[in-house]
């Protein structure tokens, strides 16, 4: 990155041209111990001015003066000085890094109503807007418009007093919004201090958004960590601004464009027309003024001499839409003259002087912005396409599965290609085909796990990370599953809390859960916890140290071993050690376990990393032997269940197995009965029909059990 040797003084907003930290700064700083308080304060002032200028040039003008690493060195030096000499400054750039947690969002009344605007995607509606404007104006001969992109983000009001940032609020109901002052303070394109000669009080309207490239990068990071990606940049921005954890807000790549003035108060000074002195007469003039104050103003705004020119602007912007690094869904056309705006006035919820000319929704065909490989709980690697958000059946889709490496090769897809997206079964988005390729070859699937760098293994079309519970991605998901209802049902250990514990270094693998009692103070000190929550979690974990064998096997998250298979394993082998040491042939003898599942179970226990974790876990957990006494009233009968019964399906499975029957998960020629509850699936019923398996509703199931002296629901056995 080239750095200019000097910069035009007229081009600066926050720093003097002779500021030593402006261009080619020397980052070989003197030791803090060699400075006195006066020298430190003077150096800190120069650093703050320079960093404000660098923020403005980088975020508002996309014209940086120095390299990123140099900026980081300046910022770190300022933090060092402020800490060492207690140099507090309310508008210091270092306040943007976030930290702390807000208890709740307060409410703020806006300086002026933040009203909506009428909108349409039809050119004739835009022309009708122009006709209404001309009808209602006394002087309609010379009506010019301003045109600008309609940003797809979250609208906010930001207030400055004497040039200093004091408050920010969401739009809310247009008159009162949520107080997001501290959240917006973390956005680097929002200056803490205005440049130039701003009015005494300035209230401006802006749009908070996430740039498209930053959105894709952030989603990539979330997917690699096993978290759900955001659906689109707008949802991500809106959700972030309402976060109470300021550090989480600061970590997300928010930006902001300013595009309207809500209040301009010069302290009583007015011009000949009674307006605040120095306030521009036109909207385009206002935007220029906001830019001169250092506010981030979009460079695509321009004037239009009439409505046809405004329509042409929208069409041009539609053609350029895909090249922009921010989401827009149309253009906003405004009467440019402020006096004419005041004459037109407002309606109850919208203004009469502006109109949004919307773009058509994107449908089905979109661009692959990135491909990221997600590591699942069982180690399976799934490629995911991150997409330019597109409308598919009324749902905004920003990612789609690519299934496996073979599917990528079959589609011939790579980053940058235009693809058609469909929703499989109206649920899971997937790439159906490449419409236009912009790459020479398909995406090259990685040879290493993207999380732990272990060399991946292939199993047919699938790819796996063999590192098991030692892989951080698998370990985190394993802890979530272990604590879930499908595992040991440890209350208070959901996905977010497990992530928080991992980030704090308290829980890396399953055995760490049982060491939390030794780190009670660290647990209690976490944001949102406290002593009561810490004690509750520790009690919940301690209550899981003697689980039923079937529950423990299900909690380990072995691929293909759900609750039913875990019960069969527990009843067949009786103890955990017997299950753990069983060979493939022994495992294959268990009901509902074939050769494939037997091999999966054997591989899980033989994986060295898993074995180490389990050995450690058994120091704290004692799975209880299965001593279920089974009768033989239903011996040799095989049941499959589908749909909802009056009692949990797992209870029905346990009951028939306790009396000698088999309860399997799929219908085959060996199935004797398919028990059908409410809202059943279709596949099992189709399989039952194909294999001539009789269906029983719950009443018929109860009658069958009664014939064998078994009551339904459990507890109704005959004497």
Image (cartoon, rainbow, N blue to C red):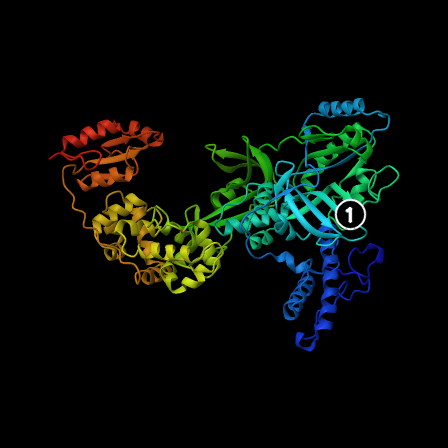
Neighbour tally class for label 1: few under 14, some 14-19, many 20 plus, Cα within 10 Å: many
Instruction: Identify the residue at the far front of this view.
Output: 268
**Which residue does the numbered mark 1 point to in the structure image?**
291
Picture quarter containing residue 440? top right
Residue 337 visible somewhere in the drawing: no
Residue 232 visible somewhere in the drawing: yes
Q: Can you give x and y, in whole percent of width and height, for residue 478 in the image? A: 39, 53
Q: Can you give x and y, in whole percent of width and height, for residue 660 in the image? A: 17, 40
Specify the quadrant that holds the C terminus.
top left
Q: Is residue 631 left or right of residue 576?
A: left
Instruction: Identify the residue at the far bottom of this view.
Output: 34
At a point 23% along the width and 27% down the height, the residue shown is: 699
Q: In terms of depth relative to the viewer, which is nearer, 6 or 462?
A: 6
Q: Can you give x and y, in whole percent of width and height, for residue 276 in the image? A: 82, 42
Q: In terms of depth relative to the viewer, which is nearer, 432 or 120?
A: 120
Instruction: Identify the residue at the far left of this view.
Output: 719
Q: Is residue 555 left or right of residue 35?
A: left
What element does badge 1 sit on? helix
Q: Can you give x and y, in whole percent of width and height, for residue 479 in the image? A: 39, 53
């Amino acid at each position: 990155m080239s750095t200019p040797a000097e910069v035009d003084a007229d081009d600066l907003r926050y720093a003097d041209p002779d500021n030593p930290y402006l261009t080619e700064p020397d980052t070989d700083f003197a030791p803090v111990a060699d400075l006195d308080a006066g020298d430190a304060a003077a150096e800190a002032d120069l650093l703050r001015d320079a960093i404000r200028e660098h923020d403005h040039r980088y975020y508002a003008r996309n014209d940086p003066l120095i390299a990123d690493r140099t900026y980081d060195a300046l910022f770190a030096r300022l933090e060092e000085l402020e800490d060492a000499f207690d140099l507090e400054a309310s508008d210091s750039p270092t306040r943007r890094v976030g930290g702390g947690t807000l208890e709740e969002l307060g409410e703020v009344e806006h300086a002026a109503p933040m009203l909506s605007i009428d909108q349409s995607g039809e050119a004739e509606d835009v022309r009708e807007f122009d006709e209404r404007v001309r009808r209602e104006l006394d002087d309609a001969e010379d009506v010019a418009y301003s045109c600008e992109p309609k940003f797809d983000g979250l609208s906010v009001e930001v207030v400055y007093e004497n040039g200093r940032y004091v408050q920010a609020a969401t739009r809310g109901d247009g008159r009162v919004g949520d107080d997001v002052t501290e959240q917006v303070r973390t956005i680097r394109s929002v200056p803490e201090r205005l440049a130039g000669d701003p009015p005494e009080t300035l209230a401006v309207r802006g749009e908070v958004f996430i740039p498209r490239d930053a959105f894709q990068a952030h989603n990539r990071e979330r997917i690699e960590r096993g978290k759900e990606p955001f659906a689109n940049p707008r949802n991500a921005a809106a959700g972030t601004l309402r976060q109470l954890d300021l550090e989480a807000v600061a970590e997300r790549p928010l930006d902001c464009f300013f595009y309207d003035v809500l209040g301009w108060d010069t302290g009583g000074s007015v011009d000949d027309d009674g307006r605040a002195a120095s306030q521009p007469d036109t909207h385009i003039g206002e935007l220029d003024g906001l830019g001169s104050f250092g506010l981030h103003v979009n460079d695509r705004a321009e004037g239009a001499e009439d409505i046809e020119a405004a329509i042409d602007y929208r069409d041009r912007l539609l053609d350029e839409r895909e090249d922009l690094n921010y989401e827009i869904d149309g253009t906003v056309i405004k009467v440019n003259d402020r006096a004419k705006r005041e004459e037109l006035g407002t309606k109850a919820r919208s203004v009469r002087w502006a109109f949004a000319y919307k773009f058509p929704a994107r449908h089905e065909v979109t661009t692959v912005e990135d491909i990221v490989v997600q590591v699942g709980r069982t180690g399976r690697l799934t490629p995911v396409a991150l997409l330019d958000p597109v409308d598919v059946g009324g749902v905004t889709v920003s990612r789609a599965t690519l299934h496996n490496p073979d599917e990528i090769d079959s589609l011939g897809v790579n980053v940058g290609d235009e693809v058609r997206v469909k929703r499989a079964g109206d649920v899971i988005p997937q790439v159906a085909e490449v419409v236009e390729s912009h790459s020479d070859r398909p995406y090259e699937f990685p040879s290493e796990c993207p999380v732990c760098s272990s060399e991946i293994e292939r199993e047919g079309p699938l790819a796996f990370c063999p590192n098991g519970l030692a892989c951080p991605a698998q370990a985190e998901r394993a802890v979530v599953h272990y604590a879930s209802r499908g595992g040991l049902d440890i209350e208070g250990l959901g996905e977010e809390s497990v992530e928080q514990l991992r980030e704090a270094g308290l829980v890396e693998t399953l055995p760490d859960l049982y060491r939390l009692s030794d780190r009670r103070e660290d647990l209690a000190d976490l944001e949102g916890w406290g002593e009561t929550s810490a004690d509750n979690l520790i009690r919940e974990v301690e209550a899981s140290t003697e689980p039923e064998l079937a529950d423990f096997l299900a909690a380990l998250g072995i691929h293909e071993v759900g609750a039913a298979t875990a019960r069969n394993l527990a009843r067949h082998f009786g103890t955990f050690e017997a299950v753990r040491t069983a060979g493939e042939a022994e495992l294959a003898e268990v009901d509902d376990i074939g050769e494939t599942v037997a091999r999966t179970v054997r591989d899980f226990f033989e994986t060295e990393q898993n074995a180490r974790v389990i050995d450690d876990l058994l120091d704290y957990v004692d799975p209880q032997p299965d001593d279920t006494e089974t009768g033989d009233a239903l011996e040799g009968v095989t049941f499959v269940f589908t749909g909802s019964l009056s009692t949990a399906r797992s209870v029905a499975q346990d009951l028939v197995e306790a009396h000698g029957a088999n309860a399997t998960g799929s219908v085959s020629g060996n199935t004797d009965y398919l028990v059908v509850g409410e809202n059943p699936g279709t596949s099992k019923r189709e399989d039952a029909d194909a294999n001539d398996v009789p269906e029983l509703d719950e009443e018929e199931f109860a009658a069958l059990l009664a014939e064998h002296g078994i009551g339904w629901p459990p507890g109704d056995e005959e004497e």
